[in-house]
Image (cartoon, rainbow, N blue to C red):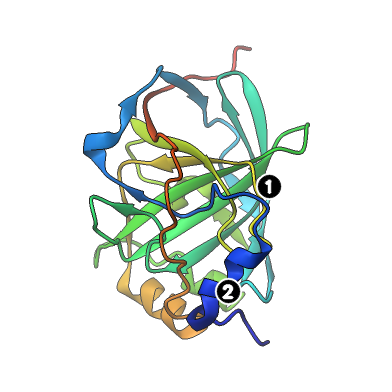
């Protein structure tokens, strides 16, 4: 299937409905500390996965739920970028995982995890891309320590650059096996969008506290 050509990404802005686009470059010195956030990861666990080849890259449709500050967000799908889209203090990680969620009002939240090479990390993504495996534990897509996140309002990072996207970027990276990175590079190399202007936005850092559903 023909995919978006990232060589021509400068033209994508013409489809944007807002100047608050994503991704962005985060400078820690400019980040503001916000309220602590409570997160219930109870239903962020094992899920069936259906791979869908799409113009914007392979999407993995799945199920799960995240409860953030008592608001429920249902997992819709996840995908991977070969090369992180968001920069932290000018550094680009090996990959960035996006888990797209929606609430009952139709609003969108993207949980993002930066991935760093770890030769000892289990191979997770290669069998999903080949469809040898059709289930995944969503926790395996995230760092073990989920103690903080960066948040801001932006857009999706592929056309039509849907606006009013809540970004929830975990500050600790998840390990990723080199075999998985090779799979990304073979499937869709360097599919990351360049950072966009902040346009007056402030990035907020939140300490995360894990809570569990009351029975």
| Residue 22 position (above or below residue 159) | above
Q: Looking at the image, which is closer to me, 67 or 132?
A: 67
User: In the rendered view of the protein, which quadrant contains the C terminus?
Assistant: top right
Q: Looking at the image, which is closer to me, 41 or 208?
A: 208
Mark 2 vs 1: CB contact within 8 A: no
- SS at badge 1: loop
In the image, what residue occupies the spot 42% across and 80% down?
185
| Residue 145 position (above or below residue 24) | above
- The answer to whether any part of residue 159 appears in the image is no
Answer left or right for 118 relative to 211.
left
The CA span between labels 2 and 1 is 33 Å
Residue 111 percent across, percent down from the top left? 51, 44
Q: Looking at the image, which is closer to me, 192 or 141?
A: 192
Answer left or right for 136 relative to 64.
left
In the image, what residue occupies the spot 36% across and 45% down?
143
The quadrant holding residue 53 is bottom right
Residue pointed to by mark 1: 63
Residue pointed to by mark 2: 11
Identity of the residue furthest to the top in this view? 214
Mark 1 Cα-neighbour bin, 10 Å: few <14, some 14–19, many ≥20: some
Mark 2 Cα-neighbour bin, 10 Å: few <14, some 14–19, many ≥20: few
| Residue 186 position (above or below residue 39) | below
User: In the rendered view of the protein, which quadrant contains the N terminus?
Assistant: bottom right
- Please identify, in this view, whether the residue under mark 2 or under mark 1 is nearer the observer: 2
Answer left or right for 28 relative to 140.
left
Residue 86 percent across, percent down from the top left? 38, 55
Identity of the residue furthest to the right in this view? 105
| Residue 89 position (above or below residue 130) | above
- The answer to whether any part of residue 186 appears in the image is yes
Query: Which of marks 1 and 2 precedes in the sequence?
Result: 2
């Amino acid at each position: 299937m023909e995919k978006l050509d990232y060589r021509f990404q400068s033209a994508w802005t013409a489809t944007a409905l807002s100047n608050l686009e994503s991704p962005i470059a985060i400078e820690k010195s400019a980040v503001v500390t916000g309220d602590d956030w409570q997160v219930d990861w109870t239903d962020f666990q094992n899920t069936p996965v259906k791979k869908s080849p799409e113009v914007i890259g392979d999407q993995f449709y799945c199920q799960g739920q995240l409860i953030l500050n008592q608001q429920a967000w249902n997992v819709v799908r996840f995908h991977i970028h070969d090369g992180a889209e968001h920069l932290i203090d000018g550094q680009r990680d090996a990959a960035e995982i996006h888990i797209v969620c929606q609430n009952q009002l139709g609003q969108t939240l993207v949980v993002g995890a930066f991935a760093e090479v770890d030769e000892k990390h289990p191979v997770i993504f290669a069998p999903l891309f080949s469809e040898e495996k059709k289930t995944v534990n969503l926790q395996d897509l995230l760092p073990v320590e989920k103690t903080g996140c960066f948040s801001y309002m932006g857009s999706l990072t592929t056309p039509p650059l849907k606006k009013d996207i809540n970004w929830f970027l975990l500050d600790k990276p998840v390990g990723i096996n080199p075999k998985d990175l090779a799979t990304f590079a073979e499937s869709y190399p360097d599919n990351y969008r360049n950072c966009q202007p902040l346009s007056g936005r402030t990035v907020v850092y939140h300490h995360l506290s894990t809570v569990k559903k009351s029975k």
